[in-house]
Image (cartoon, helix red, strand yellow):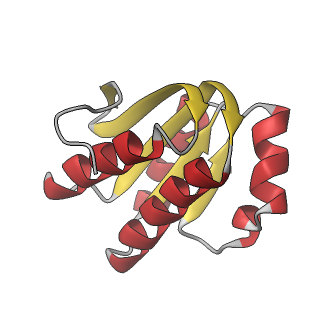
């Protein structure tokens, strides 16, 4: 796994938002995994993954998302995918990730993800 390189992280109301850009593929998957591990080491259990600038996703990218889901599931956490292009949503559906359970939540925007998190915290 690549060390030292991470995707950009922004914090929205203390929730980490990872900005992924370019292709999410075999080459960039280790960077996403490192970013996820970095956030998990800081005790983040809710992570937003912004896929707005992802043009392409392959099995390597899917494996990085599955890695995040597995790690967050072990902590009773959640992964929020936002700004997914129709092509990315299609790949997620084909890969069976949209039916994976409550750990993965697909939202339209970071604001929708934050509202979902706030709603879950109020229950």
- Residue 19's image quarter? top left
Q: Which of the pair 7/81 is nearer the observer?
A: 7
Q: Residue at x 43, y 74 (%)?
A: 73
Q: Is residue 9 visible to us here?
A: yes
Instruction: Single out the residue that lies furthest toward the front.
Output: 27
Look at 32% across and 33% down and name the residue there: 13
- Position in image of residue 56 (x %, y %): 70, 32
Residue 18, how many percent across, how many down? 40, 33
Res 70 quadrant in image: bottom left
From what the image shows, is residue 54 above or below residue 68?
above
Compared to residue 41, the image places residue 8 above or below, namely above
* Residue 111 horizontal/vertical position (percent): 55, 30
Q: Residue at image x 33%, y 24%?
A: 8
Q: Is residue 64 above or below residue 66?
A: above
Residue 28 on image: x %, y %: 46, 37
Residue shown at 35%/30% (left/top)? 7
């Amino acid at each position: 796994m690549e060390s030292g390189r991470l995707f950009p992280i922004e914090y929205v109301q203390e929730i980490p938002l990872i900005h992924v850009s370019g292709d999410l593929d075999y080459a960039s998957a280790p960077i996403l995994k490192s970013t996820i591990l970095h956030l998990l080491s800081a005790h983040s259990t809710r992570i937003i993954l912004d896929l707005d600038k992802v043009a392409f996703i392959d099995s390597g990218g899917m494996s990085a998302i599955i890695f995040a889901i597995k790690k967050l599931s072990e902590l009773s956490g959640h992964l929020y995918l936002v700004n997914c292009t129709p092509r990315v949503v299609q790949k997620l559906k084909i890969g069976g990730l949209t039916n994976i359970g409550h750990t993965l939540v697909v939202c339209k925007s970071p604001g929708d993800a934050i509202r979902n998190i706030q709603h879950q915290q109020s229950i």
